[in-house]
Image: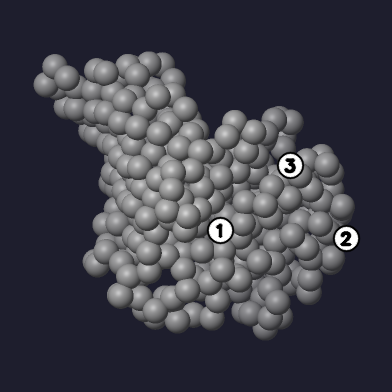
C-alpha cells in the first residue's frame, strides 16, 4: 500500500482522486494541499462523500508534506510556475514525485527540475496519460515487433475547441503561468505519444498564431512540418480554435499498413486490403468540456509509478522522457518566431 499526497486542487485533481480511489486500496489518498485551506477542506470532505473512503488530511504547505514520514510519494498538480520550489523541498526530503504535465513553462526550467531530482536520486514521473490508453499500448508493442514495417509518414492532429471563457480564467494561456498555449497545455499529450512511437524529431518548420476566435496571450493554432531522426517525415496541426472540437489522432503510414490512433481506438489498414479495429472508443476532452475523459488513464500512470517504486525501476514516463516533447515544443515556437527551420541537436 502506498500513501500519497495531492498538491494543487484545480480541474484535474478530481480525476486523480477518482483514479486513486479506483485502485482498490493499493494507493491511498492520505492528504491534500492547496494554497487556499478552505478549498483543501472542501476537497477532502468531497472525496470522503464521493468515494466512501477515509477523509484525507489537509496540509498547509509543501514543507508539511515533506516532513510527514507516512507519505510515500506526492502527486503535483499545481500550475507550472509553482513547480521548482515544490520540487526543491520534496527532493531534499527524498519524496518521489509524480507530476502533471508540463514539467515547467520553458525547456530550460524543465531541464532544471529533472536535474534537481536526478541529483537528489528522487524518482520523477510525468502524467502523460495518453501513453496508457489500451490502443496506445497495443500500437507501441506492434511497432516494436515490426508488424507494419518502417514508418515513412506521421500525421499528428489535435483539433480541439476551448471557448473564450476558458481563457478568461486568470493566468490561463499566459507565458507567466502556463508557459504557452495549445502546444504546452493541450497538444503536449499527443505530441509526447507520437514521439514515444516514432522517436525524436530532428528538424521542425512551423507557424504558430493566435486566431481571431480568442483573446489570449499565446498561440491557439500551430501547424508544422517535421523530420524525424529515423528518416520519416510528418505534419503537426494543433488548435483550440476548431469548434466544436474533435478527438486527436496520430496516423502512421508504414511499409505494410497505415495505422491510426483515434478516439482511443487503433485502426489498421493493410496494403493487402484487410482492415482491423482494436480498442474502445472514448471521449478525450477535445470539446468545450476539457475534463470529458475517463480517469482510467491516470490510474494507469499512478499505478505504474507505484510499481516502479516497488521494483526499483524508472516509471514508464519519467521526467527525462518528457524532456523530448518539451524540446519539440520549444523548437516549434522558436521556428515560428524566427521564421526558419530549427534543428533539434542530439545533445538537446
Quarter of the rendering containing residue 305: top right
What is the distance, in whole Å, between disc 2 and disc 3 at their CAs? 18 Å
Read off the residue under disc 1. 16
Q: Tell me the quarter of the image containing the C terminus.
A: top right
Q: Which mark is residue 232?
A: none
Residue nearer the viewer, 204 or 12: 204
Read off the residue under disc 3. 123
What is the distance, in whole Å, between disc 3 and disc 1 at their CAs? 19 Å
What colour scheme governs how the chains and residues are painted in the rendered image of this protein?
Answer: one colour
The residue drawn where x is 39% and y is 59% is 208
Helix, strand, or loop for circle 1? Answer: helix
Residue nearer the viewer, 46 or 164: 164
| In the displayed structure image, the side of residue 164 where residue 313 appears, left or right | right
| In the displayed structure image, the side of residue 231 where residue 256 appears, left or right | left
Asked if residue 88 can be seen in this view, the reply is: yes
Quarter of the rendering containing residue 86: bottom right
The residue drawn where x is 70% and y is 77% is 35
Q: Earlier in the sequence, mark 3 or mark 1?
A: 1
Foreground label between 2 and 3: 3
Q: Residues within 10 Å of mark 3 (few under 14, many from 20)?
A: many
Quarter of the rendering containing residue 286: bottom left
Q: In this picture, is 303 found above or below 255?
A: below
Q: In this picture, is 285 found above or below 231?
A: below
What is the distance, in whole Å, between disc 1 and disc 2 at their CAs? 23 Å
Residue nearer the viewer, 99 or 114: 114
Q: Tell me the quarter of the image containing the N terminus.
A: top right
Helix, strand, or loop for circle 2? Answer: loop
Amino acid at each position: 500500500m502506498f500513501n500519497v499526497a495531492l498538491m494543487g486542487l484545480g480541474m484535474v485533481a478530481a480525476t486523480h482522486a477518482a483514479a486513486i480511489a479506483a485502485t482498490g486500496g493499493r494507493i491511498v489518498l492520505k492528504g491534500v494541499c492547496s494554497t487556499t485551506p478552505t478549498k483543501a477542506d472542501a476537497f477532502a470532505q468531497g472525496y470522503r462523500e464521493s468515494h466512501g473512503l477515509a477523509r484525507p488530511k489537509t496540509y498547509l504547505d509543501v514543507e508539511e508534506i515533506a516532513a510527514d514520514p507516512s507519505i510515500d510519494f506526492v502527486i503535483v498538480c499545481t500550475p507550472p510556475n509553482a513547480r521548482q520550489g515544490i520540487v526543491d523541498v520534496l527532493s531534499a526530503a527524498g519524496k518521489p514525485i509524480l507530476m502533471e504535465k508540463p514539467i515547467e513553462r520553458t525547456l530550460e526550467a524543465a531541464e532544471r527540475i529533472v536535474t534537481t531530482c536526478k541529483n537528489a536520486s528522487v524518482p520523477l514521473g510525468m502524467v502523460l496519460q495518453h501513453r496508457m490508453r489500451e490502443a496506445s499500448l497495443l500500437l507501441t508493442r506492434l511497432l516494436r515487433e515490426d508488424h507494419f514495417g518502417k514508418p515513412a509518414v506521421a500525421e499528428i492532429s489535435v483539433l480541439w475547441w476551448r471557448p473564450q471563457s476558458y481563457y478568461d480564467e486568470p493566468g490561463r494561456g499566459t507565458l507567466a503561468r502556463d508557459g504557452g498555449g495549445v502546444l504546452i497545455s493541450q497538444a503536449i499529450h499527443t505530441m509526447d505519444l507520437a514521439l514515444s512511437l516514432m522517436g525524436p524529431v530532428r528538424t521542425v518548420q512551423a507557424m504558430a498564431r493566435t486566431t481571431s476566435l480568442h483573446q489570449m496571450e499565446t498561440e491557439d493554432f500551430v501547424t508544422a512540418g517535421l523530420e524525424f531522426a529515423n528518416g520519416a517525415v510528418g505534419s503537426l496541426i494543433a488548435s483550440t480554435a476548431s469548434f466544436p472540437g474533435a478527438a486527436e489522432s496520430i496516423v502512421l503510414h508504414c511499409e505494410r499498413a497505415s495505422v491510426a490512433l483515434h478516439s482511443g481506438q487503433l485502426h489498421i489498414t493493410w496494403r493487402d486490403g484487410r482492415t482491423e479495429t482494436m480498442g474502445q472508443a472514448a471521449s478525450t476532452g477535445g470539446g468545450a468540456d476539457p475534463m470529458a475523459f475517463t480517469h482510467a488513464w491516470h490510474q494507469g500512470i499512478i499505478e505504474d509509478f507505484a510499481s516502479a517504486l516497488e521494483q526499483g525501476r524508472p516509471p514508464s514516463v519519467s521526467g527525462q522522457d518528457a524532456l523530448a516533447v518539451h524540446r519539440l515544443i520549444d523548437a516549434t515556437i522558436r521556428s515560428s518566431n524566427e521564421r526558419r527551420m530549427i534543428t533539434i541537436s542530439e545533445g538537446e
